[in-house]
Image (cartoon, grey):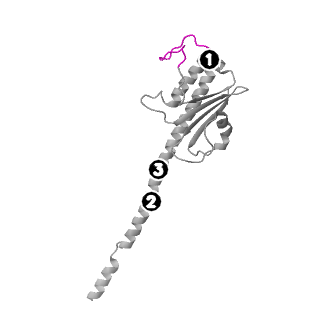
């Protein structure tokens, strides 16, 4: 009788074997590694999105400047703005933002000066540009068309729509098609 009681007690015991615990640990570790990879991808995407948002804001800023001073921007031209050549504040304007007797070309140069300051991040106190090596290009074309292109260098290589705006990039003389770290934002509008 004693032996049947022991066998009945073993059948009633429940628990996990060491093999089951190890398999569960492996499955859990793969899940955690997936979460870490997802976090890294989200952080990179957030950074890229922030750069594109800044480029969009800067392009729209210049479009609004051109719309306000439309007669100053009436001639067709291509203008390149980068950090390599610092534009100077026109003589008719002062550092506090006041202006006196500015000509059309002075107003255009003032727009470009302030846009370059924004492009390089000088307007933000104690910070540099969040766009790496930014270059801005303004193409004032026929029939009141305006194209603003902003090109910068991203953190990592990836493929983008380089062929879609190759004409703007070539006209501005910016970048290389094979450069997978180059980012771009192009805004075309009619004034």
Residue 34 inside the magenta-drawn segment: no
Q: Residue at x 59, y 30 (%)?
A: 60
Q: Which residues are magenta?
A: 89-103
In this picture, is 186 found above or below 35?
above
In this picture, is 103 found above or below 30?
above
If the image is split into quadrants, where does the C terminus sit? Answer: top right
Q: Earlier in the sequence, mark 3 or mark 1?
A: 3
Q: Residues within 10 Å of mark 2 (few under 14, many from 20)?
A: few
In this figure, which residue is indicated by the disc labeled 1? 105
Front-most of 7 and 133? 133
Residue contact at pointers 3 and 1, CB within 8 angstroms: no
At which x and y percent is residue 172? 64, 33
In this picture, is 139 found above or below 12?
above
Q: Residue at x 44, y 32 (%)?
A: 127
Q: Is residue 26 left or right of residue 7?
A: right
State the separation of the CA atoms marked 1 and 2. Answer: 61 Å
In this figure, which residue is indicated by the disc labeled 3? 40
Residue 152 position by quadrant: top right
Secondary structure of the residue carrying tag 2 is helix
In this picture, is 24 found above or below 156?
below
Q: Residues within 10 Å of mark 1 (few under 14, many from 20)?
A: few
Judge depth for marks 2 and 3 and give the one in front: 3
Residue occupying the far right of the picture: 143
Front-most of 135 and 115? 135
Residue 82 position by quadrant: top right
At which x and y percent is residue 22? 38, 69
Secondary structure of the residue carrying tag 1 is helix
In this figure, which residue is indicated by the disc labeled 2? 31
Secondary structure of the residue carrying tag 3 is helix
Q: Earlier in the sequence, mark 1 or mark 2?
A: 2
């Amino acid at each position: 009788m004693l032996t049947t009681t022991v066998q009945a007690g073993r059948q009633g015991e429940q628990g996990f074997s060491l093999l089951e615990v190890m398999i569960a640990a492996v499955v859990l570790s793969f899940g955690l590694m997936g979460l870490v990879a997802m976090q890294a991808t989200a952080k990179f995407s957030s950074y890229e999105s922030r750069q594109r948002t800044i480029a969009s804001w800067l392009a729209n800023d210049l479009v609004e400047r051109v719309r306000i001073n439309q007669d100053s921007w009436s001639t067709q031209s291509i203008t390149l703005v980068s950090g390599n050549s610092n534009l100077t504040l026109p003589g008719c304007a002062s550092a506090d933002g006041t202006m006196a007797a500015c000509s059309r070309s002075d107003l255009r140069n003032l727009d470009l000066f302030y846009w370059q300051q924004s492009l390089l991040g000088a307007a933000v106190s104690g910070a540099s540009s969040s766009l790496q090596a930014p270059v801005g290009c303004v193409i004032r074309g026929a029939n009141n068309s305006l194209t603003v292109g902003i090109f910068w260098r991203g953190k990592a290589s990836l493929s983008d729509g380089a062929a879609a705006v190759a004409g703007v990039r070539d006209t501005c003389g910016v970048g290389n098609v094979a450069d997978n770290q180059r980012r771009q934002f192009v805004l075309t509008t009619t004034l």
